[in-house]
Image: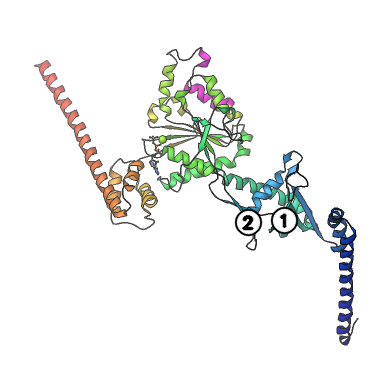
Amino acid sequence: MFSLSEIPQTASTLFSAYSTLAGSMMLLRSFANELIPQQLRSYLCTTFYHYLFNPLSNNLTLVFDEWSGMSRNQVFDAAELYLRTKINPDTERLKVSKTSRQKNFTVSIEKGEEVTDSFQNVQLQWKFVCKEPQNNHSGEKRYFELSFHKKHKQTVICYYLPHVVERAKEIKQEEKVVKLYNRECPYDDDDDGGGGGGMWGSINLEHPSTFDTLAMDPELKQMILDDLDRFLRRKEFYRRVGKAWKRGYLLYGPPGTGKSSLIAAMANYLRFDIYDLELTSIYSNSDLRRILLSTTNRSILVIEDVDCSVEMKDRQNDGASVGSNTKLTLSGILNFIDGLWSSCGDERIIVFTTNHKERIDPALLRPGRMDVHINMSYCTVHGFKVLASNYLGIKGKSHSLFGEIEGLIQSTDVTPAEVAEELMKADDADVALEGLVNFLKRKRIRADESKNNDVKGEEANEVEHEKAKQLKTG
Ligand SMILES: Nc1ncnc2c1ncn2[C@@H]1O[C@H](COP(=O)(O)OP(=O)(O)OP(=O)(O)O)[C@@H](O)[C@H]1O
Ligand SMILES: [Mg+2]
């Protein structure tokens, strides 16, 4: 042990020993720089020097190359996505990009940058490394390094890395651009396999409808959201009970009540692509099979105006289809959807829409066919408030005309589409709402008149009937 008086002397001795050692190191380095050729020196730097000049470390570093042989390394791709959400405030350089298909800018870490993360109390250090190509034939070598204390090796490999991969999957899903597949769109030339078989063309779904912007009663909206969430969660359940993982919705209601808007909101919420199937353009079951089999998982198959299937039935007899097994019937479609098609796909949603539920083929209404029936009704008071907030920005607070409008809406059959159109006619909220009041009043007068005419017509019929009776008996 040192006594207090010896400390300065000991410190000075230590300092001079350190200076001598550091001096020797520098000498050794400059000596090596002079004598050893550059290429060999850089090789030694990364191996021998590393051990010579770095103290023994408790850290373990995992390296994730971009490529694993000929295929991409999934952990590298996952890390790239995951680290976008972990950018530290002190990061100095970031990479920003955006393709035409992306909605938002992508901000990711630039080469050489480091990012820290923590997981179950383990501190983790990521580094993105890029190496210049070795020769003209090889590309830039890119990899991530992940360093942490050696004692956490198990936690990192067994729990942290799966967590990174899982989060990356979610981020990819969140960033996904929802597509609308239609057989009239230009054929899809993507490399993502969507619309396989070239049967479908696609465009990006630009429909801005979301569950927030939908004018619907809150309970119904919540019921649909809960149903969709439950459906997504129940992969195991469907497997256990031996049912195909699909869910059918029937949306019915007058034109302009938001059936198509609801489908777009569902697609935007789930990030599922939409396949819009025009039944009237399909002439045989074999066509239908090919078209349906080329749809992808995690998608919504939409068949609008399904009451027009009446026309399909008629087609059986007009000679357009050849042979009994090629006829296209609604039952045939439903059987195919229930059977072969849904058994070779996962996470499928099928939506049928109609303006006339009463005209629908009973096969569609049979129990177990369409799991959820949703009545898209005329505009309600709550629906009006959502539209007023969307179109005029009147949020939460009321307006002096609200009382009158609410009364008129309750006593008139008006669609959300009609209300929306009126609200769009002026930028000024007062003017727009006055316009809506006048529109609703006119609509109610017309409805009353046509009701009166109906009553008068019935009365006239009765009078005629009475006269005819009297003539007969007289
Ligand atoms: N419930 C609603 N919430 C918000 N906007 C709506 C709603 N219903 C209709 N709209 C507005 O009216 C327009 C037409 O509605 P939409 O196409 O969804 O009706 P639809 O029920 O599918 O009609 P159709 O039976 O004619 O196909 C939408 O673009 C939207 O602007
Ligand atoms: Mg529609």
The image quadrant of residue 42 is bottom right
Q: Find residue 127 and name its label.
A: 1
N-terminal of the pair, mark 2 or mark 1, is 2
Dot 2 and dot 1 residues touching (CB under 8 Å)? no
Which sits in the foreground, 270 or 251?
A: 270
The secondary structure type at the circle numbered 2 is strand
Q: Residue furthest bottom?
A: 5
User: What's the amino acid at mark 2?
Assistant: Leu
Q: Is residue 471 magenta?
A: no
The segment highlighted magenta reads 322-340
The location of residue 355, given as percent across then percent down, is 38, 32
The location of residue 226, given as percent across then percent down, is 51, 44
Which sits in the foreground, 41 or 337?
A: 41
User: What's the amino acid at mark 1?
Assistant: Lys
Is the magenta region chiefly helix, strand or loop? helix
The location of residue 405, given as percent across then percent down, is 29, 49
Question: Quadrant location of ligand 2?
Answer: top left
The image quadrant of residue 93 is bottom right
Q: Residue furthest front?
A: 34
Which sits in the foreground, 152 or 197?
A: 197
Q: Is residue 220 above or below residue 324?
A: below
Q: Find residue 115 and name its label.
A: none
Quarter the C terminus occupies: top left
Q: Is residue 123 above or below residue 387?
A: below
In the rendered image, which residue does mark 2 sit on?
Answer: 94
Q: Is residue 308 left or right of residue 240?
A: left
- Dot 1 alpha-carbon crowd within 10 angstroms: few under 14, some 14 to 19, many 20 or more: some
